[in-house]
Amino acid sequence: MAVTRSLRRPVLLLATTLLLATTTVSAQRAKQEPRDLQGYWTSGTVTPLQRPPELAGKEFLSEPEAAEFERTWLETFRKNFPPEDLQAPDLDYTYMDRMKVVASRRTSLITDPPDGRLPPQLPAAKARADARPKPSKDDPEVLGLDERCLLETAFGSSNASPPMLPNPFGQNFYQIVQTRDHVMIYTEVVHDARIIRIGGTHPPAAVQLWLGDSVGHWEGDALVVDTTNFSVKTHFRGSGPKLHVVERFTRTGPGTIRYQFTADDPETWARPWSAELPFNATSERMYEYACHEGNYSMTNVLRGARAEENAARR
C-alpha cells in the first residue's frame, strides 16, 4: 500500500504539471491567435484604387449597384486594350479570376482623401517620369517592370512591394509565414518573398531595395510595418526613393485580415494618402509563377503576326 501511494504521488504530480502546462499553452495560443497572420490569402477585388469619375461623391454602392458593377466589370476593363489583344483568352474568364467588390461596397480602395482619389502629383514627379527612358521593344532594359517580370505593376498594381495593391487580372495570392522575429510575405506574382523584421532600424538611405526595407512592431493585435529605402527603379505610380509606407495588418476573423496603409512621398504627391482592403483566406493552392523575361509563347507570336498582317492590309 505504501509503495502504491509512493508511486501514485509522482504520477499525479506529473499529470497535474502537464495539465497546467497544457492549459497555459492553450491560453497563450488563444490569447495570441489574433496575432497569427499565417496562411494563404487573396486580396483580389474589382474595387478600383481610385473612385471612378462617374461615381464622384458616392462613397458606397448599394447591393444592386455592386452586383451590376461586378457583372459589367470585365466588359469595361477590356476597353483598355486594342482589338488584337482582345483575341487572347487571358482577357476573359477563361483565364482571369472572377472577383467581387470589397465587402463594404466602397467605390474606391482609397479612404483618404475623402473623394477617393489620389492627391495631385507634384511637378518633381512629372519631371522624373519625363527623364526616364521611354519603353522600346528594341531595348528590353527600358521596358516596364511588369513586362520584364521583375515586379507586378500591371495597371498600377503592386503585388509584392508596399503598398500591396491587387492587379485586375487576378493571381493576387499570398502566403504569410511568421516567427517571433520575422514575418515573410510570399507573393505569387512575381514570386517575391518580402521579409519583415520585427524590431530594429532602417539602413542608411543610400541602401535601396526593390521592395523597400520593412521593419514591423505590434500595436495591440495589429502588425504595423514601416517601409522605406525604396529603389529609384520601382517608382510606384510615379513615386521616388523617398516613398514611405506604413501598413497595418489586423486579423479580424478566422478568414480575414484588414490591410490598411498610408503612403507618403514629399517629392511625388501633394499630401499623404491612405487605402484599405481585405485579405481573405483561401484554400486554393499557390503554384509557381513561371514568368521568364523575353519568353514569348507561340500563341502570342502568332497573334502578333496576324496583327502585323492586318496592319499592313490597312
Image (tube, helix red, strand yellow):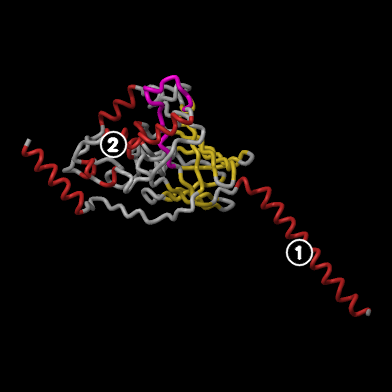
Instruction: State the extent of the magenta-drawn residues as a range.
Output: 44-61
| Label placed on residue 78 | 2
x%, y% of residue 82?
Answer: 21, 36
Looking at the rendering, in which quadrant would you find the C terminus? top left
Going by the numbered disc 1, the residue's amino acid type is Leu
x%, y% of residue 115?
Answer: 45, 21
Magenta segment's dominant SS is loop
Q: Do the CB atoms of the residues marked 2 and 1 lie less than 8 Å apart?
A: no
Q: Is residue 265 above or below residue 167?
A: above
Residue 264 visible to the viewer? no
Q: Residue extending furthest right?
A: 1
Going by the numbered disc 2, the residue's amino acid type is Arg
Residue 109 visible to the viewer? yes
Dividing the picture into quadrants, the one containing residue 108 is top left
| Secondary structure found at label 1 | helix
Q: CA–CA distance between discs 2 and 1?
A: 62 Å
| Label placed on residue 18 | 1
| Secondary structure found at label 2 | helix
* Side (left or right) of 172 relative to 140: right
Q: Earlier in the sequence, mark 2 or mark 1?
A: 1
| Label placed on residue 141 | none
* Side (left or right) of 289 relative to 12: left
Q: Residue extending furthest front?
A: 64
